[in-house]
Image (tube, rainbow, N blue to C red):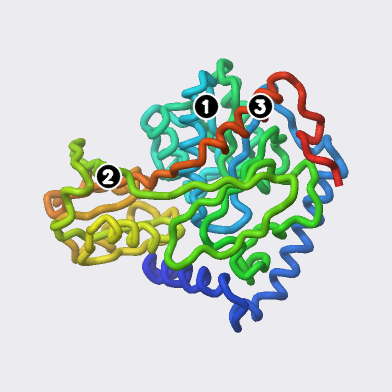
Amino acid sequence: MPSPRRAARWSALWRRASERRGALAHALLPLAWLYGRLARQRRAAFLSDATRTSRLPVPVIVVGNVIAGGAGKTPTAIALIRHLLSRGHRPGLVSRGYGRRGDDVLLLPQVPDPVLHGDEPSLIRQATGVPVCVGADRVAAARMLLERHPDISVLVCDDGLQHYALGRDIAIAVFDDRGVGNGWLLPAGPLREPWPPGAIDRLSPHLLLRQGRGPGPARPLPEVPGIPLFHARRRLGDTVHWADGSTSPLASLDTTPVTALAGIARPEVFFDMLREQGIQPSGLIALPDHARADVFEEALSAVEGTVLCTEKDAVKLFPWWQAHPRRDRWRMGAIALVTDIDPRFFEALDTRLAACAAGALSSDHGHQTA
């Protein structure tokens, strides 16, 4: 099994290859064709038999990616939940919980364990306070959540765009500055499904959200007639949250030597954001997405002083630091990755949600069936 740092390097190599149609991407095309065939067959099976999809008694909002890895789905889910709360809704969230131990359906406690519940669901639970349930079977997770929290009025499904078994009323596809990369399906390219779609059907997204913030200029994103596109900006939060419970302004670290650590899909985005804030890390530690907490020991073995990470990393890193017998070697701080979303996106969302409540959407949820 490769070391965490080597795995991160391989992941970065694949991301670069998926943005152009070079030798590596061409070599992977046969696998992409097979993936595409299986994906089309699976989608067709759900489209031809509506009984394969389970409907819930509350509206379901699915947030997911067409492109693999690091498009900003989790910050979007947090922003979406906070918006729903501000409108008086009582949201809950279901998620697969990638990177966690086991596949069981689990309801997250007030203080979740990222090993058991996953880092992203744990972060969302801590950041929003809403009920969260994880499980490989998202339908079972959703039913458990509604059974335990019958006051939930709307359900958010994290990373559920290709999970067709759970019926959706509103589907949001999140893109970033990579657009569709080289335009090929996994693993030759970054696409989980063909984009733009050949036809719009009841499994297609209703809203597109493109987030800007990455190295280099943004790549074109093909627009799809009938699916509105909105924009958002990703940025760092203004506050550093330290593992000892204290806080300080991010701007106060502009002259402080720091090591930057990121175990997310695109660590380079976090590192570039720090530099834009005038923080020049003396060391960079890139770990794989959903890296286990036990990799921090090796990654930080030769590091001392201030370490800055993302909030997603902090749900694992802070407990590790608090239990470490030599924790005084490091000052651990976390910074939120914030998504500033065009208000018109939320207006469109509210309109669709109101239509759901009024029963005004058709059985294909407002899309014309292909």
Question: In the image, residue 60 lies at what x, y percent?
Answer: 65, 31
Residue lying at 20% horizontally and 38% vertically, measured from the top left: 247
Residue under pointer 3: 59
Question: In the image, residue 367 lies at what x, y percent?
Answer: 78, 39
Q: How many marks?
A: 3
300 over 112 or under it: above or below: below
In depth, the one of 55 and 276 nearer the eye is 276
Front: mark 1 or 3 = 1
**Can residue 104 be seen in the rendering of this structure?**
no
Q: Mark 1: few, some, or many residues within 10 Å (few <14, many ≥20)? A: some
Front: mark 2 or 1 = 1
Q: Mark 2: few, some, or many residues within 10 Å (few <14, many ≥20)? A: some
Q: Which mark is residue 84?
A: 1
In depth, the one of 84 and 8 nearer the eye is 84
Residue lying at 38% horizontally and 33% vertically, measured from the top left: 126
Residue under pointer 2: 318
The answer for how far apart the CA atoms under marks 2 and 3 are is 35 Å
367 over 176 or under it: above or below: above
The answer for how far apart the CA atoms under marks 1 and 3 are is 12 Å
User: Counting residues from the N terminus, which is met first, the one under dot 2 or under dot 3?
Assistant: 3
Q: In the image, what residue type sits under mark 1?
A: Leu
